[in-house]
């Protein structure tokens, strides 16, 4: 869809190439470039700031963290490095519905990290042990609204201490800037297409307010916060 026909007052009904079947050797460089964007534009910062505030809640054993839609695994590897520098023991698990993404994440991760990778649909996944925190990044904009509501309910059921959604914010300026930047940086063709489309498909605060209410969360149960550049995050810390 031409960018001048997009109405950023509503989610764009567009598809992303990364959601379509493709070869593993095509997916691998695409995921690497998504990780590069995360590094360049401080994509890990919101999740790490939230973990900094909530991880001390668990003091007597390793903190169990599940990353849903883990993709390349760069988010969990960054969490692992954050935990090591602070002397926080963690048990990290990444889950993704795409088995090729899980295989690529495992390839990119040193075995000593201890991260566990699972190829499964999160809605069919039943954790063996209780999960302290569920996190996700750049995941929810891939879902239709009813599935986001189901995901919020799933996290409420399975995250003992809280959850954090790190995603994009729908707006024209970051859409156009990312279109230009991804081309100038000669990122993977999938990323050049999907990056701006992801922004056009993302949610805004009123969307999250509506979905949280539909999931049974009251007005004060979850917080919605914007981060620069172009991130919108939803956090829930459960009373202990």
Image (cartoon, rainbow, N blue to C red):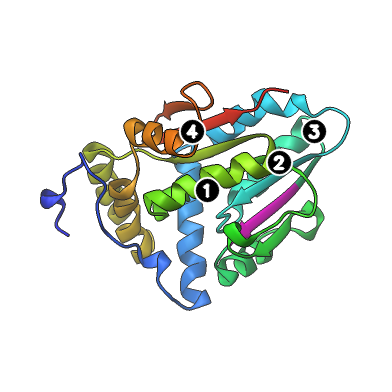
In the image, taking residue 112 as reference, residue 212 lies left or right, namely left
Closer to us: mark 4 or mark 1?
Answer: 1
Q: Residue 123, percent across and down?
A: 58, 57
Residue 234's tag is 4
Q: Measured along the vertical axis of the image, is residue 98 above or below residue 76?
A: below
Closer to us: mark 3 or mark 2?
Answer: 3
Query: Disc 3 marks which residue?
Result: 88
Are the residues flagged by discs 3 and 4 in contact, CB closer than 8 Å? no
Q: Which residues are magenta?
A: 92-96
Q: Measured along the vertical axis of the image, is residue 219 above or below residue 115?
A: above
Q: Counting residues from the N terminus, which is met first, the one under dot 1 or under dot 3?
A: 3
Magenta stretch: includes residue 94? yes
Q: Quadrant of residue 110?
A: bottom right
Query: Disc 1 marks which residue?
Result: 151
Q: Residue 100, percent across and down?
A: 57, 71
Q: Secondary structure at mark 2?
A: helix
Query: Disc 2 marks which residue?
Result: 81
Closer to us: mark 4 or mark 2?
Answer: 4
Q: Counting residues from the N terminus, which is met first, the one under dot 1 or under dot 2?
A: 2
Q: Residue 178, percent across and down?
A: 30, 46
**Inter-mark Cα distance, 1 to 2:** 27 Å
Closer to us: mark 1 or mark 2?
Answer: 1
**Inter-mark Cα distance, 4 to 1:** 12 Å
Q: Counting residues from the N terminus, which is met first, the one under dot 3 or under dot 4?
A: 3
Q: Counting residues from the N terminus, which is met first, the one under dot 3 or under dot 2?
A: 2
Q: Residue at x 65, y 31 (%)?
A: 51
**Prevailing secondary structure class for the magenta stretch in the rendered image:** strand
**Inter-mark Cα distance, 4 to 2:** 23 Å
Q: Secondary structure at mark 1?
A: helix
């Amino acid at each position: 869809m031409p960018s001048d026909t997009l109405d950023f007052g509503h989610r764009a009904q567009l598809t992303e190439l990364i959601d379509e079947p493709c070869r593993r050797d095509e997916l691998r460089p695409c995921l690497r470039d998504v990780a590069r964007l995360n590094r360049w534009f401080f994509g890990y910062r919101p999740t790490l700031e939230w973990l900094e505030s909530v991880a001390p809640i668990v003091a007597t054993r390793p903190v169990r963290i599940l990353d849903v839609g883990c993709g390349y695994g760069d988010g969990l590897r960054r969490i692992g490095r954050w935990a090591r520098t602070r002397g926080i023991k963690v048990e990290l698990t990444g889950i993704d519905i795409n088995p090729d993404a899980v295989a690529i994440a495992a390839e990119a991760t040193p075995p000593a990290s201890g991260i566990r990778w699972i190829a499964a649909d999160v809605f069919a996944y039943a954790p063996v042990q209780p999960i302290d925190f569920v996190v996700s990044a750049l995941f929810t904009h891939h879902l239709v609204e009813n599935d986001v509501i189901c995901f919020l309910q799933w996290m409420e059921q399975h995250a003992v201490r809280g959850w954090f959604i790190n995603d994009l914010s729908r707006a024209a300026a970051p859409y156009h800037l990312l279109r230009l930047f991804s081309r100038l940086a000669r990122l993977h063709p999938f990323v050049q297409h999907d990056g701006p489309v992801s922004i056009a498909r993302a949610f805004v605060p009123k969307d999250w307010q509506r979905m949280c209410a539909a999931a049974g969360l009251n007005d004060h149960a979850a917080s919605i916060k914007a981060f620069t550049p172009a991130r919108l995050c939803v956090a829930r810390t459960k009373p202990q």
